[in-house]
Structures are given as structure tokens and as C-alpha cells.
Image (cartoon, grey):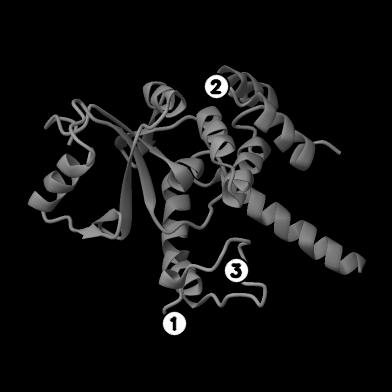
Amino acid sequence: MHAAGVISEYALFGAIAQMKYTEPVATLDADVLVAMPEPKGLDVLKPIYEFCAARGYRPEGEAVRVGAWPVQFIPAFSPLTREALEQAETADFEGVPLRVVGASYLAVIALSVGRAKDQARIVGLLESASVSRGQVARLAARHGLTEAWRRFEARFLDE
Amino acid sequence: MSDTLKLLERQAAWQKGRVALTWAEKIRMAEAVRESVAQLSRNRLPMASGVSASGHPPDDSRQQG
């Protein structure tokens, strides 16, 4: 997809990326953050769906079924997610190099979303020592999330 | 009570120990439980207050069972 010019960059994120750093967690789908070379119109993901359909990968709700997993493609939608994509790490998956969003970005994206499972993700990443409170605080501050981080610390981390 | 606490501590240690598995092994574990999680999600019943067990309003599209 990258070689064909359908996407300009990608990185796994969400629970699948989290599991690179933490213990396994339950998830229903695989999330892929993508950047498009020339987003056209409102349906920015259309070229991805067309590319997949031409190769026999069918849409399933808001995802595309690839093997056992529904894969959800999510355009980089903010300065934070665009930076996460640029700074993604390359990880080895049984000999296959895959781009994966880094732990600090996973934590701060989760902070910005703020659902219960996102809060659990931040705690999991901190417990695994893949990211420190200081790293999260600094990245959160750069993206206007200092107050959200302060509230999170008070609620979940401070005694 | 102390036996229960010890059991919970052993369980927590076992769970945390799984962080040492390879990424691929962890994803396979998630894949193994994915259908069960989906089934539970589909069968989830709304609570009397109209709020689901997750704390979110019930989503009828996920309550097919």
C-alpha cells in the first residue's frame, strides 16, 4: 500500500501497539494510523478501501478484514497523531519490520481520548516502564494536555 | 483472607510476567480471546440505570444475542 502510493506513512497503534510494551490485552480489532499523500474530498480513506477490495480484502463495518483481524485505518487527525506517525519505531514481528507508535505517544494519545480503556492503557504503559511519568508530562505539555495529565495523575497515580 | 491475598498476588505476578512474552506471542493470545470478547460484548445486557457495565450508554447494535 505504501509502495503503491496509497498511503505515505503508517504505524500500528491502539491495543496492538500497546502489546509491544505491556502484557497482552483484549481487543477486537487492529488499528493502523495512516497518512495519505493527497487527501481528496471527505472520504479520505476511500483509496485504502479500494486498494484492499481490489486484492480481495473486504470491508467489515468500519474495518477491513485481513486474515483473522478486522483492521481499522485511522487518518492522522491532529498534530499529536501526525507527530506520533513521524516518530514511530520500527519493530520486528517474526522477521517482518512493522512501524509502531512509540510508548510515550500511545500514552499521550490515550490521554487525549480519555475513555476508561485509554486510562487503563496509560497505567499499563507506565507499569511496564516503557515510558516514564516525566516523558508523558513533557509530551502532554507540548500538545496542550498539561491539565488533562495533572487530572490523570491526581486520579490514578498520586496517593 | 491472607490466602486470598496471596492468591491474588500470585495471579498479578503471573499476569505481569506475560509482559516478557514476544510481541507476536502477545498478539496471538489476544487473538485467541478475541471471539469470546466479541461474544460477551454482543450479549451484554443494559443495566437498570440504562448504563452498560462499561459505564457507557447501551449500544443496541452490539446487543444481538
Q: Nearer the viewer, mark 1 or mark 3?
A: 3
Which of A136 and A152 lies nearest the eye of the viewer? A152
Q: Residue type at mark 2?
A: His
Residue A79 picture location, percent across and down: 43, 23
* Mark 1 chain: B
Q: Which residue is mark 1?
A: B65
> In which quadrant of the rendered image does the N terminus of chain A lie?
top left
Q: Residue at x 71, y 52 (%)?
A: B13
Residue A76, horizontal then vertical, whole percent: 36, 32
Residue A46 to residue B34: above or below: above
**Residue on which the image places disc 3:** B52
Please indicate whether residue A70 sits to the left or right of residue B25 in the image. left
What chain letter is assigned to the residue under label 3?
B
On screen, A44 above or below A24?
Answer: above
Q: Which mark is residue A143?
A: 2
Instruction: Say what amino acid the circle numbered 1 marks.
Output: Gly
